[in-house]
Image (cartoon, rainbow, N blue to C red):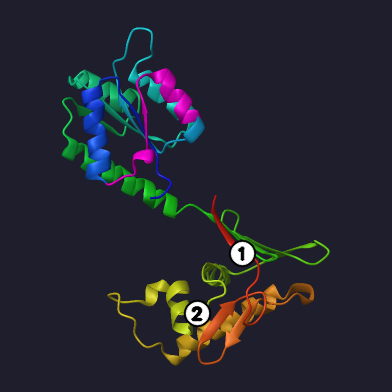
Amino acid sequence: MNDISILVVEDTPPDLAVIKKALIQGLHLAPQAILTASNPSEALRLASDVSPQLAILDIVFGPQHMNGFELSQELRMLDPEIYIIFQSRLTELKHKVMGFKQYKGDAYIGKPIDADDLALLVESILRRIRSAKAHEPRLFTYGDLTLDERTATVVRLDLQARKYEITLTPTEFRLLIALMQHREMIISKQKLFDLVWPAHEEDGVDAELAQDELNRVEKVVSQLRRKLAVDGLPSLIWNRPGYGYMLALRNGTTGPPATTKQS
């Protein structure tokens, strides 16, 4: 995950070294992905600037600082979705109950820390972060065409910047997403069928498409082309006989860069 950042708040150098070993050597994370702070005040300054996805927090600091439980609340004020791992020599059941139930921690580990165990734990949390990120709604733009998964809307602008909202069926919407993900690339009918109707695949084997399935792709593409050609605008979908379809500003040419954003 290229944009992952992990905040480690630990005031004991040997314990910090074990945590960094677990993350860098055990999980092969880039050193710059790991933010370290020796106290809660420093941690909050870092979190305000960077917005880490995961925080590994010691619990006991000096009397002039809040404790790790209180720090977790402050971090969740900045980002309610942040994952929290508590790590401490306070390993009595009452402390673990407090960490999980009162402060909603995602994990609680005791010291001394085992680097291999920590690496496995962090790896499982990173999988959850990746999975959640993969399902975030996206915003696609290409030329005058915008598709927003958050609101399931498609909009085009003409040369006078007049906005046209285009109503699509769910199948047409999925088809347009597939074309925008592969913009300026030819996609075969079989590939489009796999992307738009994925439930047809069995055991991961790509069977030869039946003629009625080919016809289904052609029909939905035709419907989508008509809808995109609102008020005389070009449809942007080009047919390459014998090869498939392509979303492009002009047939066989490229336009300005397209963008995809996580919302």
Q: CA distance from mark 2 to mark 1?
A: 19 Å
**Amino acid type for the residue under numbered disc 2:** Ile
**Residue 72 on image: x %, y %:** 38, 25
Which residue: 24% across, 19% down?
Answer: 95
How crowded pointer 1 is (Cα within 10 Å; few <14, some 14-19, many 20+) is rated as few
Please tell me whether residue 184 is drawn above or below residue 33 in the rendered image. below
Residue 27: give x, y in percent of width and height.
26, 45
Q: How many marks?
A: 2
In the displayed structure, 107 sits above or below 12; it is below
Amino acid type, mark 1: Pro
Magenta stretch containing residue 21, yes or no? no
Q: Residues within 10 Å of mark 2 (few under 14, many from 20)?
A: many
Q: Depth check: 221 or 235 in front?
A: 235
- To which residue does mark 2 refer? 187
Q: Which mark is residue 125?
A: none
Q: Is residue 196 left or right of residue 248?
A: left
Q: Secondary structure at mark 1?
A: loop
Mark 2 or mark 1, which has the lower sequence index? 2
The one of 197 and 46 positioned closer to us in this rendering: 46
Instruction: Give the labeled residue for mark 1.
Output: 257
Q: Can residue 129 be seen from the camera position used here?
A: yes
Residue 33 inside the magenta-drawn segment: yes
Residue 15: quadrant of the picture? top left
Quarter of the view holding residue 66? top left
Q: Quadrant of residue 165?
A: bottom right
